[in-house]
């Protein structure tokens, strides 16, 4: 019996020891968890006084690390969205030591005022938000940056022109030239402008000036064009490039090749005029689709590079982004990246192809010569089936599924579409940059529109869209030829060996408002004194 008592006592003592030791063993882990929770960035919602007393709804993520000062990052929300847009990214930046202030621009959601479309009141609001952050947070006045998507990107760029306290900007899917974005080559971008208009009325309060501008824009009254362009220029960072350069902000621009709201041409032009630290990134996709997954806190190349850019120029991090080649692109339908020292270095040569007359199948030739003396008439006002796709959706499919807008080139109706094809290429053609078309046009009316498309065509005649652009002419003499110079949107696209290039010209595209009078025609040709040609930038 005694041995059994001793064994029972030993078991009881062991159990008691274990129960006593368990809380002691768990205590350090609980303490660590509590400490981590205490050190987590703190989020609060606030009202921020904007210019003229307008109240801006915002939120603040602030580090809870006890430091006296932190770099400040200001995030204006996108068009139609509010200050909740960036919560995941704001928390990540705050965890890295930033004070992050996100706000809803005036005129949208709960913020006061009316929609000013990045006008002077919006630019003044940027400075008021910075003032508020310096007074109410641990923000460091010597290390201030801005970032944003779309509308937030445009406001950030404009802010860097008018507030020299801003040392770095990351503009994602933004604009530099608003007029060129909305009606380049005199052609209104119908779908993108309509989407912005609907979103503005659903989520905000358009002011009288915006409503008047929209009426002028959709009404196609050319007498109003100077007023629209002046309105747009006031809201374009390209207008203030000299101020941005003088202030010296480090500017990162990131857009998509297929951005149907802010196409890349206006951005590459702006990038080349910047003289301070700068970076340009272009990827497949459409408006804001390349960076969208990052808003959910998922891994995202655009936000990774944005973080590196701001870390270097606001926190002094030696992460190498300042030494890497500044032009960073991912070609269409590909997964890998290419890097270049400048935008001019993206292409190394140009191939000029002359446009020849139609053969018995109704297809002209694209060749190294300069065929002249031919004329190809096309009727206007009928969609041939060649088009740039659907805003946001088509280029989104290309980004994730690698399916660009596609047509059957042999089946295009020749009465309403002019088609030229090259011979099959013996090697891969690496198109890099903006394809240009110089085309003789003889209209039957004073005004009209055409749309030019470049396709990659396989052996079955299936064409995948490489690039395109609309073109509208005004005040021309009917029956008199003129030269139309069309600059297609920037691209990076590899045409496989054995494939052809096809140029298609028609007069209707659902993306745009075209201006061909009823029953008008366009005669396309190549006069001897000024041959028509297609210029393809290659690498």
Image (spheres, rainbow, N blue to C red):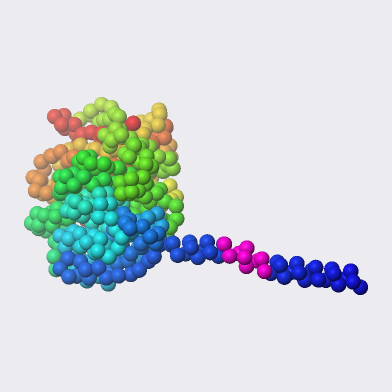
Please tell me how many numbered marks the rendered image carries: 0
Q: Residue at x 15, y 60 (%)?
A: 120
Direction from residue 164 to residue 324 in the image, left or right:
right
Residue 292 in view, yes or no: no
Residue 426 to residue 103: above or below = above
Residue 488: which quarter of the image? top left
Residue 346 in view, yes or no: yes
Q: Quadrant of the C terminus?
A: top left
Q: Residue at x 25, y 68 (%)?
A: 48
Our reading of the magenta stretch's main secondary structure is: helix
> Along the line of sight, which residue is nearer the eye, 183 or 503?
183
Residue 135: which quarter of the image? bottom left
Residue 271 on image: x %, y %: 24, 42
Q: Quadrant of the N terminus?
A: bottom right
Instruction: Reply yes or no: does residue 258 show up in magenta.
Output: no
Q: Residue at x 55, y 65 (%)?
A: 30
Residue 364 on image: x %, y %: 29, 35
> Along the line of sight, which residue is nearer the eye, 177 or 55?
55
Residue 54 on image: x %, y %: 19, 70
Residue 132 on image: x %, y %: 24, 64
Q: Which residues are magenta?
A: 20-28
Furthest-top residue in view?
369
> Along the line of sight, which residue is nearer the eye, 373 or 195?
195
């Amino acid at each position: 019996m005694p041995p059994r008592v001793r064994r029972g006592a030993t078991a009881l003592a062991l159990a008691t020891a274990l129960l006593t030791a368990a809380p002691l063993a768990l205590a350090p882990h609980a303490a660590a968890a509590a400490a981590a929770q205490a050190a987590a960035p703190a989020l609060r919602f606030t009202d921020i006084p904007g210019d003229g007393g307008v109240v801006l709804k915002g939120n603040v993520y602030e580090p809870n690390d006890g430091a006296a000062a932190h770099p400040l990052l200001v995030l204006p929300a996108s068009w139609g969205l509010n200050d909740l847009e960036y919560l995941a990214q704001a928390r990540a930046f705050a965890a890295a030591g930033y004070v992050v202030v996100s706000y809803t621009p005036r005129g949208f959601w709960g913020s006061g005022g009316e929609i000013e479309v990045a006008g002077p009141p919006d630019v003044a609001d940027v400075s008021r938000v910075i003032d508020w952050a310096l007074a109410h947070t641990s923000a460091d006045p010597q290390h201030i940056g801005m970032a944003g998507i779309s509308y937030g990107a445009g406001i950030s760029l404009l802010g860097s022109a008018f507030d020299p306290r801003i040392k770095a900007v990351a503009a994602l899917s933004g604009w530099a030239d608003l007029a060129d974005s909305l009606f380049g080559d005199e052609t209104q971008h119908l779908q993108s402008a309509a989407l912005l208009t609907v979103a503005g009325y659903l989520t905000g309060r358009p002011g009288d000036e915006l409503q008047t501008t929209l009426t002028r824009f959709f009404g196609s009254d050319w007498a109003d064009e100077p007023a629209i362009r002046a309105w747009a220029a006031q809201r374009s960072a390209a207008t203030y490039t000299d101020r941005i350069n003088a202030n010296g902000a480090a500017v990162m621009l990131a857009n998509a090749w297929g951005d149907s709201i802010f196409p890349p041409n206006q951005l590459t032009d702006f990038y080349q005029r910047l003289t301070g630290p700068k970076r340009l990134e272009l990827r497949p996709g459409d408006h804001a689709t390349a960076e969208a997954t990052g808003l959910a806190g998922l891994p995202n190349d655009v936000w990774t590079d944005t973080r590196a850019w701001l870390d270097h120029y606001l926190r002094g991090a030696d992460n190498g982004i300042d030494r890497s080649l500044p032009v960073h692109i991912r070609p269409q339908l590909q997964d890998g990246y290419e890097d270049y020292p400048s935008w001019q270095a993206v292409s190394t040569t140009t191939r000029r192809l002359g446009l020849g007359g139609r053969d018995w199948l109704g297809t002209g030739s694209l060749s190294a010569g300069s065929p002249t003396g031919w004329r190809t008439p096309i009727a206007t006002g009928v969609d041939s089936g060649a088009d740039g796709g659907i805003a946001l959706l088509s280029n989104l499919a290309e980004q994730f599924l690698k399916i660009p807008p596609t047509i059957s080139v042999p089946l295009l109706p020749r009465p309403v579409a002019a088609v030229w094809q090259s011979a099959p290429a013996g090697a891969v053609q690496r198109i890099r940059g903006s394809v240009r078309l110089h085309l003789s046009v003889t209209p039957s009316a004073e005004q009209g529109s055409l749309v030019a498309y470049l396709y990659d065509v396989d052996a079955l005649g299936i064409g995948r869209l490489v690039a395109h652009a609309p073109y509208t002419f005004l005040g021309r003499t009917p029956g008199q030829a003129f030269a139309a110079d069309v600059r297609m949107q920037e691209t990076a696209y590899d045409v496989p060996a054995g494939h052809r290039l096809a140029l298609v010209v028609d007069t209707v595209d659902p993306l745009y408002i075209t201006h061909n009078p009823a029953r008008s025609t366009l005669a396309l040709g190549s006069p001897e004194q000024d041959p028509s040609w297609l210029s393809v930038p290659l690498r």
